[in-house]
Structure formats: structure tokens, C-alpha cells
Amino acid sequence: MNNSEIQAFLIETIITKPMQAYSECVQRLTRNPNDIDAKGRISEIEGFFLSEPFSALTHANGTEIVESIHAMLEKQGVRISAWLDRKEQNDVQ
């Protein structure tokens, strides 16, 4: 594998696949806002974007990435923060 192939593999593994999984979970929540598995997976993916390993590998600000994903979804009418807040409220109760 040359450097270009390694870089493409890392981008696919570290960014593209988690984003695809995130998108699938958002679609599931659009159909069923109470889908606990989708909410949990979104939380896991966001946790990965906020992790030190992600930051070390990408040199990206995970907080900004998560905030931009939420802002993009909100512009599309998807209230992701409300879904996740509801999950957290249910966990507290």
C-alpha cells in the first residue's frame, strides 16, 4: 500500500463509515423517534468524534464536527438535539 492508499483507507475508516452509520441512524429516528438503538449508536459515534484518538488521527475539532452535523440536520428540519435530549431525560427517570 502506498501513502495515498493508506490515507484513503484511513479517511474511509475514521470519517466516512461513521458518518454513513450516523446518517442511517438519523433516518431510523425520522421513521421512529423512539428508536433506542439508533439513539445509542448516534451517541457512540458522537463520542468517537469527540475522542482523543479521533483528534490525534485527524487533527480535527470533534466538538465543531458534532455541532456542524447538528446544525446541518436542524436546517433540514431534523431535530436531532430534541431526540437525544429525550433519550437523556428517559435515562434520568
Image (spheres, rainbow, N blue to C red):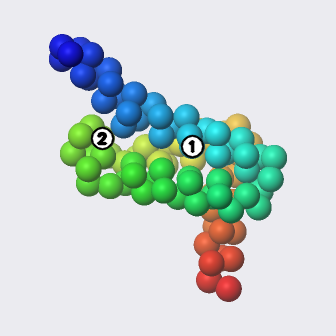
- Closer to viewer: mark 1 or mark 2: 1
Above or below, comparing residue 76 to residue 87 in the picture: above
Q: Quadrant of residue 81?
A: bottom right
Which residue is disc 2 drawn over? Answer: 60
For this view, does 17 lie left or right of residue 77? left
* Percent of width and height locating residue 48: 39, 52
**Residue at 65%, 58% in the rendered image:** 37
20 left or right of 73? left
Nearer to us in this view, 24 or 58: 24
Residue beneath the point at 73% across and 58% down: 35
Place of residue 38 in the rendered image (x, y in percent of width and height, measured from the top left): 65, 54
Residue at x-position 45% and y-position 31% = 16
Badge 1: few (under 14), some or many (20 or more) residues near its Cα, within 10 Å?
many
Mark 2: give few (<14), some (14-19) or many (20+) Cα within 10 Å.
Answer: few
The dot on residue 63 is none
User: Which quarter of the rendered picture does the C terminus lie within?
Assistant: bottom right
**Residue at the image point whose x is 61% and y is 72% from the top:** 88
**Three-letter amino acid code at the position of disc 1:** Tyr
Instruction: Decide which of 50, 79 is in the foreground and name it.
Output: 50
Label 1 sits on a secondary structure element that is helix
Residue 74 in view of the camera: no
68 with respect to 7 (left or right): right
* Whole-number angstrom distance, CA of label 1 to CA of label 2: 18 Å
Sooner in the amino-acid sequence: mark 1 or mark 2: 1
Q: Position of residue 17 (x, y in %)?
A: 47, 34
- Residue situated furthest right in the rendering: 31
- The reply to whether residue 23 is visible in this rendering is yes
The residue where tag 1 is placed is 22
Determine whether label 1 and label 2 are within 8 Å by CB: no
Q: Amino acid at mark 2?
A: Ala
- In this rendering, is residue 28 above or below 43? above
